[in-house]
Amino acid sequence: MKDEKKAIWGWAFYDWANSAFATTVMAGFFPLFFKKFWAVNLSFQKSTFYLGTANSLSAVIIAVLAPFLGAAGDKGSMKKKMLICFAFLGIVNTFSLFAVSEGEWLPALLFYFTAYVGFAGGNLFYDSLITDVATIKKRDVVSSLGFALGYIGGGILFLTNVLMYLKPSVFGIPDSTTAVRIAFISVACWWAVFSIPLILFVKEPKSKIHISLIGSFHSGWRQLKDTFKHIKQYKQAVLFLIAYWFYIDGVYTIIKMAVDYGASMNFPSESLIKALLLVQFVAFPAALIYGWIGVRIGVKKALLVGIIAYCFITVFGFVMQEIWQFYTIAVLVGLFQGGLQALSRSFFARLIPNDKSGEFFGFYNMLGKFAAVLGPFMMGLVALFSGSNRYSILSLIILFAAGALILTRVDSDRTT
């Protein structure tokens, strides 16, 4: 029992560790610093194009490789080893951003691109390890614990880095530019230190057959082809993946487009940053509470409640006029975002065979990487034809409605 608790907390703390990259680097400082420091000699249009290309290319690479990597990890009992390798890749390249000088946009993009591959690749194996650290009954709560720690951990470091950027002299830092560069080092160190509990306490069951690294990739490829061949055997998991792709596309679209939507309404940049921080700290207790609710009323019902809440959020965004309403939306997103993500992960885990968890979570992460593709396109198309950003955000209800409808047909008591 004691070892089980250590494994659960060790696993959950990896979310605390790598969420610093998602908040400080991906959502926060890299896009801002790239334009104002590394790509200072490029036009606004070129810098946007290069950054967007790097984001899309890295996501597509992980999305395409995810099922294959997951299958290889299953066959060789190498999920934990592969997680460590990808995490190391992300940590080293995040740290390296500190050394990139002004105007060196290409090295900055290369380091960021590789760091993101490490971040996303590590998450694939992190998600799949939940089947090794928690029993079916505990997975909802354990998954929620991971997301909750991720929100609070990433939020704490992001808040510290924002304060460093706004008030560098208080921290003994000469200027805000140096503060941002130090922030990249802090993320790398944070990520490395808080990955140690997972390395020490999470034990992955050994495969009965010894297999080499190269052999695991060959065997994983054969397993992946076999799964495609017999995909009908896993009808409930496939049905859930379709539902998940629809509603998580809507969730990720709101995450990615909220700041842009707020900026289009001329809300101050400082207010948008505060709203981003608000989401992090509200989501911490909310994810834990949502996990508890999932146990009480049933995970599928809890997921449907979250999807309906997002429908309300889109309507609220449609009628929003004042900055306090934007803060209200931030609170609502924080209340449901982490819970919806956490319970989706644990719900999927109960629909799949344990010995193929890496492979199936490869598909799960692949869809996650391809999410926020349809939503932004819909928003842009609706905005173009309607001439209004308000109608564009309202269009996201289509994604949530489709996801909810398909989810109602998933039978969580069956795995085939």
Image (cartoon, rainbow, N blue to C red):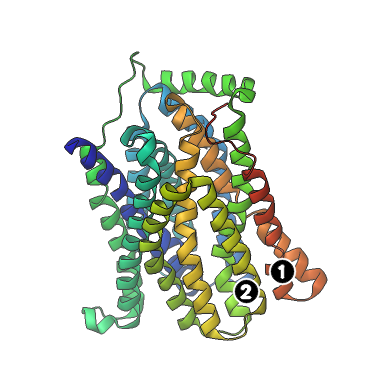
Q: Which residue is tagged 1?
A: 392
The first of marks 1 and 2 along the sequence is 2
Residue at the far front in the pictured view: 297
Relative horizontal placement of residue 349, taking residue 166 as reference (left or right): right
Element carrying mark 2: helix
| Kind of residue at disc 2 | Gly
Between disc 1 and disc 2, the foreground one is 2
Q: Position of residue 380 (x, y in %)?
A: 72, 65
Query: Who is closer to the viewer here, 283 or 406?
Result: 406
The residue drawn where x is 54% and y is 57% is 306
Element carrying mark 1: helix
Query: Who is closer to the viewer here, 77 or 404?
Result: 404
The residue drawn where x is 57% and y is 70% is 258
Q: Position of residue 283 (x, y in %)?
A: 41, 63
| Kind of residue at disc 1 | Ser
The residue drawn where x is 55% and y is 48% is 369
Q: Which quadrant is home to the C terminus?
A: top right
Residue at the far top in the pictured view: 209
Q: Position of residue 280 (x, y in %)?
A: 40, 66
Is any atom of residue 69 visible in this view? Answer: yes
Q: Which residue is tagged 2?
A: 317
Q: Which quadrant is home to the N terminus?
A: top left
* Mark number, residue 261: none
**Residue count near mark 1 (Cα–Cα under 10 Å), binned few <14, some 14–19, many ≥20:** many
